[in-house]
Amino acid sequence: MYEVIPNIIQTFLIAIGAIYLATFLFIPDLKSVIIITFTMFMILVSLVAALHAWGMQASSIMMVELVMSIGFCSDFCVHIVHAFLTATGTRKERAQQALINMGMPIFCACLSSIIGVVFLSFAQSYLFRTFFRTIISIMILGGIHALCFLPVILSLIGSHWSSHINDKLQQNNFIQMTSSINNDSQITEHIIEEYLTKKRTIQRAPDTIEEEDDELFLPTKNDETSVNNRNIYT
């Protein structure tokens, strides 16, 4: 059992180094990459402790499953850090935005992976049972570290570039400009409606006057009676 431990440690270091280089290519920020690597190391240490609590012994099978778990660790952490770096505002605001944007996808990924391997718990094979325990442990521990621990660390010591503040100011200016344009358009529409209402009133006024004049010149019943009487006498 103890003969495999040096190989496990060596494989760990090589895999973490490879993940460090790959992450640095997609996230060219040294501070963020160090935070990702540190979080991954914490997840893997917790995973080893969880597997020991499950009663698993160090073996080549366990080594393969631990190396596979490094990919899950980096996946969770990189998504949160990338969302944090692409957001705008202060560290706390960007951490909240990263958690809002990526929290539910990561949670659904963990839950779907757990559901997918639940049936392996009923298997009699040692390989399947160890795979089930490894996946369950890495999903729970990786989700907790990515959704609870990592946003707090980023809100405290995460990378804070000047472009984040500038983008936030530009966004606020754009929102203010859009709101002012909307207000101006509403005022313009109100003025146009008032103008059209007045114009319709002015157009109706001559027609009303003509009708009143026609009513004045129409003969009444008394006028018709007097005319008839005059015709009789004549």
Image (tube, grey):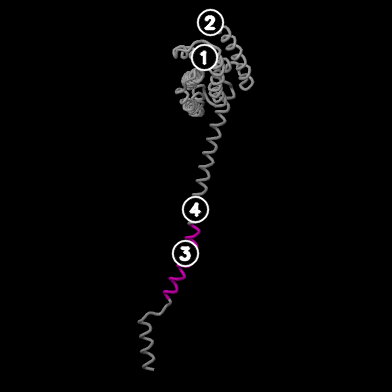
Which mark is in front, 2 or 3?
A: 2
Mark 2 or mark 3, earlier in chain: 2
Q: Which residue is mark 2?
A: 2
Q: Nearer the viewer, mark 1 or mark 4?
A: 1
Q: Quick check: can you spot residue 57?
A: yes
Q: Which residue is mark 4?
A: 193
Question: Mark 3: which amino acid?
Answer: Ala
Q: Earlier in the sequence, mark 3 or mark 4?
A: 4
Gap between marks 1 and 2, in whole Å?
A: 19 Å
Q: Are marks 1 and 2 in contact (CB under 8 Å)?
A: no
Q: CA distance from mark 2 to mark 3?
A: 104 Å
Q: Secondary structure at mark 1?
A: helix
User: Amino acid type of disc 1?
Assistant: Leu
Q: Residue at x 52, y 23 (%)?
A: 90
Q: Which residues are magenta?
A: 198-216
Mark 1–mark 4 CB contact (< 8 Å): no
The residue that disc 1 covers is 44
